[in-house]
């Protein structure tokens, strides 16, 4: 079992990303989540066609 060590820069970036996502309203966050689901589903169906 290998444990990866997260450098400080990654943690700082994560904090910035979290701050940015907090600027979104709940509706916007839900919308982007739904859009991501749709894209994932599309990609899955396209993959399974072949």
Image (cartoon, rainbow, N blue to C red):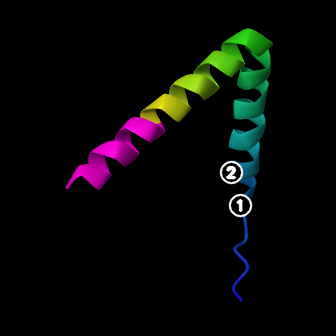
In the rendered structure, does residue 7 fall within the stretch colored magenta?
no
Q: Is residue 35 above or below residue 13?
A: above
The quadrant where residue 42 appears: top left
Q: Is residue 40 above or below residue 3?
A: above
In the rendered structure, does residue 47 fall within the stretch colored magenta?
yes
Q: Secondary structure at mark 1?
A: loop
**CA–CA distance in space, label 2 to label 1:** 6 Å
Q: Residue furthest bottom?
A: 1
Q: Which residue is mark 2?
A: 10
Near-viewer residue (18 or 31)? 31
**Left or right of residue 1, residue 46 in this image:** left
Residue at (45%, 39%) from the top-left corner?
41
Near-viewer residue (42 or 5)? 42
Residue at (76%, 49%) from the top-left corner?
11
Q: Which residue is mark 1?
A: 7
Q: Residues within 10 Å of mark 1 (few under 14, many from 20)?
A: few
Residue at (75%, 55%) from the top-left corner?
8
Whole-percent x, y for residue 30 in the image: 69, 20
Near-viewer residue (44 or 5)? 44
Q: Residue furthest left?
A: 50
Q: Residues within 10 Å of mark 2 (few under 14, many from 20)?
A: few
Whole-percent x, y for residue 40 in the image: 46, 40
Quadrant where the image shows the N terminus: bottom right
Q: Secondary structure at mark 2?
A: helix
Is there a contact, CB below 8 Å, between mark 2 and mark 1? Answer: yes
Quadrant where the image shows the C terminus: bottom left
**Left or right of residue 44, residue 14 in this image:** right
Whole-percent x, y for residue 6 in the image: 72, 63
Q: Magenta stretch?
A: 40-50
The quadrant where residue 32 appears: top right
């Amino acid at each position: 079992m290998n444990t990866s060590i997260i450098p400080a820069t990654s943690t700082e970036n994560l904090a910035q990303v979290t701050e940015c996502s907090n600027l979104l309203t709940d509706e916007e966050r839900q919308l982007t989540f739904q859009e991501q689901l749709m894209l994932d589903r599309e990609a899955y169906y396209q993959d399974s066609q072949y």
